[in-house]
Image: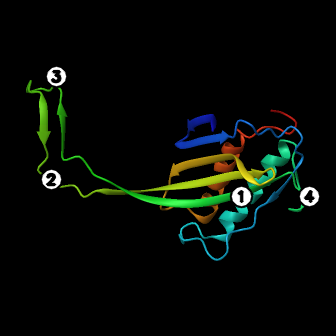
Amino acid sequence: MLVVGVASCSRIAVESSAEPDWSPVSATTYAWRPDPPGKLADPRVDEPHLVKALRSAADRELAAKGYRLADSVAADFQVGYWLAVRTREVASPRGGWRNSDDSDGRAGFWDSPVNVPPAHIEKGTVGLYVVAGEPPRNVWRGVAQRVLRSNASRSERAERVDDAVRRILEEFPRRGTD
């Protein structure tokens, strides 16, 4: 697998990769892969407006690259997606290093008498993948991750998904190019 690009800007990390033997040179059309049956496992991302924002952004970006949405039978490739949230516990430091420049001239590790509880950080992931060929196989994938804001409104969450999809598809080749 060849890594095509990695970018980190505005606290969002984006990665994409393509199979080295896949080229979209003759591809002109795409279709959406069927949604997974049932609800997504995580209620934080099982929101229809987020899926709508993701699909709208991908449709816009793929159209700008020269691809056209078609029904799944006639499409040259299919696009799938996933949304996920991961909560990570981060321990807060109980101490730190002092520089010898401090006013008392002491240097070294200090221990805080206060026991600080760990922080919980939520990271959201938006992923897109492309399936093509016979037999069908994953030929391209892109992922964006960023720390979530717990107080983000519904429209802000949709805007962040839109931004993530735009950044992911910046790495996707234009129609008729390798």
Alpha-carbon span between mark 4 and mark 3: 70 Å
Circle 1: residue type: Gly
Q: Position of residue 46 (x, y in %)?
A: 60, 70
- Cα separation between marks 1 and 3: 56 Å
Residue drawn at (64%, 55%) of the image: 161
Q: Left or right? Give the position of 145 relative to 178.
A: left
Vertical side of 87 occupied by 47: above or below: below
Circle 3 is placed at which residue position?
101
Q: Which mark is residue 80?
A: 1
Q: Earlier in the sequence, mark 1 or mark 4?
A: 4
Label number found at residue 74:
4
Q: Nearer the viewer, mark 1 or mark 3?
A: 1
Residue lying at 54% horizontally and 49% vertically, measured from the top left: 145
Q: Nearer the viewer, mark 2 or mark 1?
A: 1
Q: Could you tell me which quadrant the N terminus lies in? A: top right
For disc 4, the neighbor class at 10 Å (few under 14, some 14 to 19, many from 20) is few
Q: Earlier in the sequence, mark 2 or mark 1?
A: 1
Q: Nearer the viewer, mark 2 or mark 4?
A: 4
Could you tell me which secondary element the residue under label 1 belongs to? strand
Q: Secondary structure at mark 2?
A: loop
Residue occupying image coordinates x 70% and y 35%: 20
Report how far apart the C-alphas of labels 1 and 4 lie in the structure. Answer: 16 Å
Q: Please tell me how crowded label 2 is: few (under 14), some (14-19), or many (20+) other residues with Cα within 10 Å.
A: few
Q: CA distance from mark 2 to mark 1?
A: 48 Å
Q: Which mark is residue 114?
A: 2
